Amino acid sequence: MSLVTLLWTIFAVAAGSSATPQYDGRIVGGQVTDIRDFPYQASIQLNGQHICGGAIIGDYFILTAAHCFEEPWTELDYSVRLGATEHKTGGELLSLRQIIRHGAYNSQTHDNDLALLLLNAQLNYTENLQAVSLAGAGDILTADTRLYVSGWGYQSEGGEEGVSPALRYVDVSHVEPGVCRLAYGKVLPITQRMLCAAREGHDSCQGDSGGPLVGYAPGSARGKLYGIVSWGLGCAQKEYPGVYANVAAFRNWIDAQVGAWGWNTLINGWSGLQRVNEV
């Protein structure tokens, strides 16, 4: 995850615009997997090109990073592919009704780097498409929590090979906030709305931004969404852990946004457009 964005290259190719996005967060040191092992994984696409990841958290909602969405692009320019191992094909390619960025998102400090995507129709869950539970205040990360981050991002910091065609994942370990703050002390503040994770030679990177960091407590077979890939300095650099939006710290905001879209509101305003016609 580069502090100085490489998203720009992807955005420029996808949209042919001279606008300059801010930055981004790949799977380094990981391995290819199947969507059935990460059925909550989403590919966020701009004009048909994968740019970020996301996590299915409900019948209508994808949770991702705010920095994946920049002007001048709107909901009409984005789509989401779900239920597919490859970001270019398979599963369902869906349109968006609304992008809800956190109101306090700061593009300079990367604080509050969270966004909700409201889909145009209700999801139909399958073996390849499932929602993931959200971590709450009572879900404490420990050294024994198994953490997995997944996505289609770059496999090296230079990114010469581009984004991965197939979904990949890597396991990382929680980094204590004090250790992370010390690491980034001369770079940017690590706030209580962020959490850090790392393992030598393993990390997320460009193209993985917005993707899920899911943890399994000792003895549990059910994962919970602890983090959203946000930022970092370089990719898999030993001195700098990956930084994630701390989902538990945003539960009130997430619940309020989801609650604001009650069933009647969704039905009354549903356009009926769900699938995107692929060329």
Image (tube, rainbow, N blue to C red):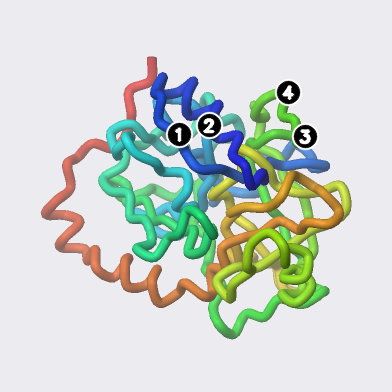
Mark 3 falls on what kind of element?
Answer: loop
Question: Is there a contact, CB below 8 Å, between mark 3 and mark 4?
Answer: yes
Image point (53%, 67%), residue name: 133
- Pick whichever of labels 4 and 1 is earlier in the sequence: 1
Mark number displayed over residue 156 = 3
Image point (72%, 42%), residue name: 27
- Pick whichever of labels 4 and 2 is earlier in the sequence: 2
How far apart, in angstroms, are the residues tagged by discs 4 and 1?
21 Å
Mark number displayed over residue 66 = none
Q: Which residue is mark 1?
A: 20
Mark 4 falls on what kind of element?
Answer: loop
Spot occupied by residue 162 in the image (x, y as percentages of width and height): 67, 25
Spot occupied by residue 275 in the image (x, y as percentages of width and height): 32, 32
Image point (64%, 47%), residue name: 3
Q: Which residue is mark 2?
A: 8
Residue furthest to the front in view is: 186
User: Quadrant of the image for the C terminus?
Assistant: top left
